[in-house]
């Protein structure tokens, strides 16, 4: 996990519509950047739907929400459509941002050691500095946790 107070690494990734998105596109805005393991899994769905349910409150606070996983653009589009997600989902199959943000880690899955994304959320200020960093977040609680952080 990256340290609070450090510059957030730049990235250029495709969103669920195939459009290139970069961190610098949102200069001057606060960003909730959350990394999650996989579209359409129970925890990831709870987290995404929680952000969607609270989306008007984030918009009111002028906060951009961006989710990143290694899933494809097509997978993200299906995920967005299935759950009516109103925010940006970025595809990182090459693990560029996932590794730059230090969320690709060894995990224990059913007794086996595997590499994967550790659910992590960053709050980045308008100057691109990490203000808050949370690793191993609880998927269902993360949206409410982040709402409290942006007040």
Image (tube, rainbow, N blue to C red):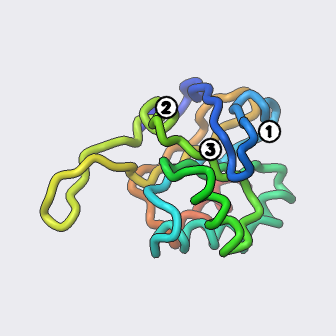
Q: Who's the residue at 25% across and 53% down the image?
A: 107
The foreground one among 114 and 28 is 114
Density class for disc 2 (Cα within 10 Å; few <14, some 14-19, many ≥20) is some
Alpha carbons under labels 3 and 2: distance apart: 19 Å
Going by the picture, which residue comes out furthest to the right? 60
Image coordinates for residue 120, horizontal then vertical, percent = 47, 50
Image coordinates for residue 111, horizontal then vertical, percent = 13, 63
Q: Which mark, residue 123?
A: 3
Image coordinates for residue 69, horizontal then vertical, percent = 51, 50
Task: Locate the C terminus and report the quarter of the image it occupies.
Answer: bottom right
Alpha carbons under labels 2 and 1: distance apart: 22 Å
On screen, residue 52 versus residue 108, left or right, reads right
On screen, residue 79 versus residue 2, left or right, reads right
Q: Nearer the viewer, mark 2 or mark 1?
A: 2
Q: Which residue is mark 2?
A: 96
Q: Which mark, residue 29?
A: 1
Q: Are marks 1 and 3 in contact (CB under 8 Å)?
A: no
Image coordinates for residue 54, horizontal then vertical, percent = 73, 70
On screen, residue 33 versus residue 30, left or right, reads left
């Amino acid at each position: 996990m990256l340290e609070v107070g450090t510059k957030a690494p730049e990235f250029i990734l495709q969103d669920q519509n195939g459009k290139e998105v970069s961190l610098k596109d949102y200069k001057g805005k606060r960003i909730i950047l959350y990394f999650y393991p996989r579209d359409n899994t129970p925890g990831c769905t709870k987290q995404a739907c929680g952000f969607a349910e609270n989306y008007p409150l984030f918009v009111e606070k002028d906060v951009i929400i961006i989710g990143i996983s290694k899933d494809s653009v097509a997978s993200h589009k299906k995920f967005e459509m299935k759950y009516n997600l109103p925010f940006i989902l970025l595809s990182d199959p090459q693990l560029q941002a996932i590794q730059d943000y230090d969320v690709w880690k060894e995990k224990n899955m059913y007794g086996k050691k595997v590499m994967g994304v550790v659910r992590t959320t960053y709050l980045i200020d308008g100057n691109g500095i990490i203000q808050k960093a949370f690793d191993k977040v609880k998927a269902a609680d993360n949206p409410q946790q982040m709402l409290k952080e942006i007040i």
